Amino acid sequence: MSNFTAEPEIDLYRTCFQNNGDLERRYEGTKLSDLLEGIDSPLVVALDGGWGSGKSVFLKYWVGQHITDFRDTTCVYFDAFANDFSGDPLGRVNTIVLA
């Protein structure tokens, strides 16, 4: 028996927080967006937490929301776990959104 729920279907770069009320992390996502939009330099962000804590789901929703709210921003979601031990990790990125 698992204590974790299955990850919902997420259309990466399109699904936003408002499309799923279960996560209830829109406030945190808005604060992250505000922080990142206030920085002028290129930036890489990593989110750390325990297994099953919701990092991947949060970031997938956040990417869609951020692109919706800030259309001139480039976001790339890279799943390091899915691409671990890959000879060409960037060759496996599904989508890159260019502004």
Image: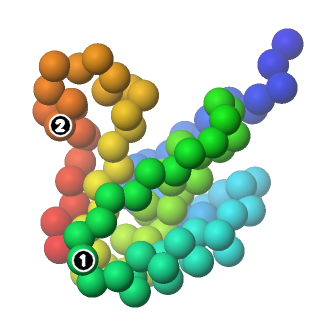
Indicate the quadrant containing the C terminus: top left, top right, bottom left or bottom right: bottom left
Work out whether residue 72 can be spotted: yes
Query: Which residue is painted at 29% across and 55% down in the image?
Result: 76
- The disc labelled 1 sits on which kind of residue? Ser
Q: Residues within 10 Å of mark 2 (few under 14, many from 20)?
A: few
Which residue is rendered at x = 16% and y = 19% of the image? 87
Q: Which residue is mark 2?
A: 90
Q: Position of residue 94 (x, y in %)?
A: 25, 40
Disc 2 on helix, strand or loop? helix
Foreground disc of the pair 1, 2 = 1
Residue 36's spot in the image, x, y percent?
A: 41, 76
Q: Nearer the viewer, residue 24 or 46?
A: 46
Could you tell me how far apart the alpha carbons at marks 1 and 2 are, in whole angstroms? Answer: 22 Å
Q: Residues within 10 Å of mark 1 (few under 14, many from 20)?
A: few
The amino acid pointed to by label 2 is Leu
Q: Quadrant of the N terminus?
A: top right
Foreground residue, 11 or 71?
71
Q: Is 18 rendered above or below residue 93? A: below
Q: Is residue 57 visible?
A: no
Does residue 92 sit above or below 1 in this rendering? below
| Residue 88's disc number | none
**Is residue 80 positioned above or below 61 on the image?**
above
